[in-house]
Image: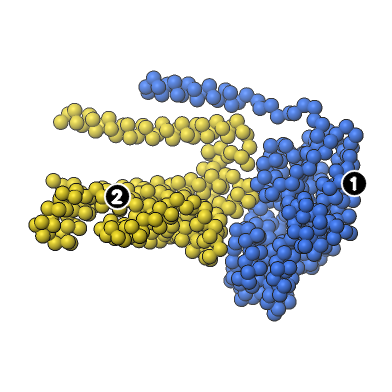
Amino acid sequence: MRTSTNKLARKVQLMISGPCESWLLVFFLWKLAALRIGKELILPAPERVFAVLLNLVQTPEFWRHFFATLRRGIVGFLFSYFAGVTFGLCAGLNSYFNQIFRPVLVTMRSTPSMSFILLALIWFKSDAVAIFVTFFVVFPLVTQNVLEGINQVDPALLEMAEIFRVKPGRILWKLYLPAILPFLVAGAAAGLGITWKVMIAAEVMAVPRWGIGTRMDTARIFLNTSEVFAWTAVVVSLGYLFDRALAYITKNLTLPWRKP
Amino acid sequence: MSQKALILWTCCFLLIFSALSPVSAVRPGETVVKIMALQGPTGLTLLKMIQDNPVLSPNITTSYTILKGPDQIIVKIVSGEADIAALPTNLAAILYNKGINIRLLAVTNWGVNYLIGRDRSIHTWTDLKGKEVAIAPPGATPDLLFRFILESNGLDPEADLKLVYYSTPVELAHLMIAGRVELGVLPEPWVSQVMLKETTTEILLDFQEEWKKIHNQNRSYPQSCLVVKTAFAQAYPELISAFLREAAASSAWVMQNPDQAGILAEKHLSIQATAGPLAIPRCNLDFLRPWEVKEEIEAFLHALYKYNPDSIGARIPDANFYQ
């Protein structure tokens, strides 16, 4: 008992000291580089970016831009995610559907996201561009994950289920779902991670009335490098927050299946 | 702290010392004067010089570089590579305010922005009430000027009309040619290019004329300028005066010979030759020294400052900016 408590304490210590030191190192090197360059225009010092960020969050516009991007990101992600899960299940359970669908998926996966952005700029109004682009990047990613999960199901078990005439609903629930669940979670994590990146890129190009990407572009036009950094920090925190939230949700969600 | 961490931190401290050592910035034996200009109307003033490459000083050669975007010219100025540069006036103010050692050499053009479209019902700015107007990009100079003019005419840019944004004038110009945007704010040479390809498009409102009216002055707003690296101006005063003479002559030549200038503009500045002769008279070239037009410059910077302080680098430049 004592050794396990010690182990836990050691683990906690590692968890805290590890990231803490790595953050220190990042800020240290950043400050160093800023000192070396000596021009805020090219590389602002970390404390300068922090000051700009503090000023920024006090303005009402900040929150309007922030929530516009947040809303767009959630809508884009959820839409792509559910479409991806649906298509992934269909393709995984039906080989004919899979054959038809696979080339489309491969094409989508290998198309540069900039191509989607450039085309979306021609086709849509600026607000829809970011959601459209997110869909085309996240959807194939999620579908791929679901497909991989379905391939993980033990064929021997499936055969047995067929012999014993287990109901299809029960097969899906008891055999497929536990197998694909880790892949669903991995798909969600990967999809969310890339959502914010693609979303910002699309916003910078499409300049919707409200959106973090638009403000980043304005800051860039006026050489406000500190503000570009500050907005970047906002997006990074957003991504981090969602990553943590997802980890928390999945930890509680997968429990029933993990029980022996 | 483990041994590895100790080594890591030691390396970091060693890096500090190397970082704090001075960077050698002075290039000895300068024999080439590097003149850089942004393509499009910003570089138009220097067109004849770029073509003829006149001798500015007996022992010094002159090199001209045309750059595609503001980002590129910024890099050249910040790195100190450009000795003289043609760029938007607010960008010059930003660079000056960010501690880049440059001085204003001359104001070269006095506005190239127009509101164009196919809606013939628009004759005055107040006619824009309730209309949808496209601008590119949001928050940049044309957007801020448009808001200024609207408010001066008693309109609320947010409530009285719908502003739609695109990321670049190129994109907006293409949409206007395709007939998908009715009213748009564009700079030259895009105005002329749209009007050539979509012949029902007309110039409806002139930013420059309105600016003169609002400010009750003969000159419009100083959109583009020439800047010089301070150290360079101090080291080569004769070369600078020779340059200013040639640049003023070049500016006058371009305005007097729009047809020939149009051909050169396609060759050097990526302005289509067909659009050039139409666009050049609307580019309002007028070569003036900073002290002659300090009031106009300050009025312009103040107006931009009011809408977004960042658009001029967060403060009005001090007297040194004007030499």
Q: Chain of mark 1?
A: B
Residue type at numbered disc 1: Arg
Residue B45 shown left or right of residue A78 in the figure: right
Side (left or right) of A30 relative to A222: left
Q: Position of residue A17 (x, y in %)?
A: 36, 32
- Which residue is nearer to you in this view: A108 or A241? A108
Q: Residue at x 64, y 50 (%)?
A: A222
Residue, x 69% and y 37% (percent of image)? B79
Residue found 65% across the figure and 59% down from its top: B170
Q: Which residue does the numbered mark 1 point to in the structure image?
A: B245
Q: Nearer the viewer, residue B120 or B210?
A: B120
In the rendered structure, find residue A148 and report the number of the disc placed on it.
2
Q: Position of residue A177 (x, y in %)?
A: 22, 54
The kind of residue tagged 2 is Glu
Residue at 70%, 45% in the rendered image = B73
Question: Is residue B60 placed above or below B117 in the rendered structure?
Answer: above
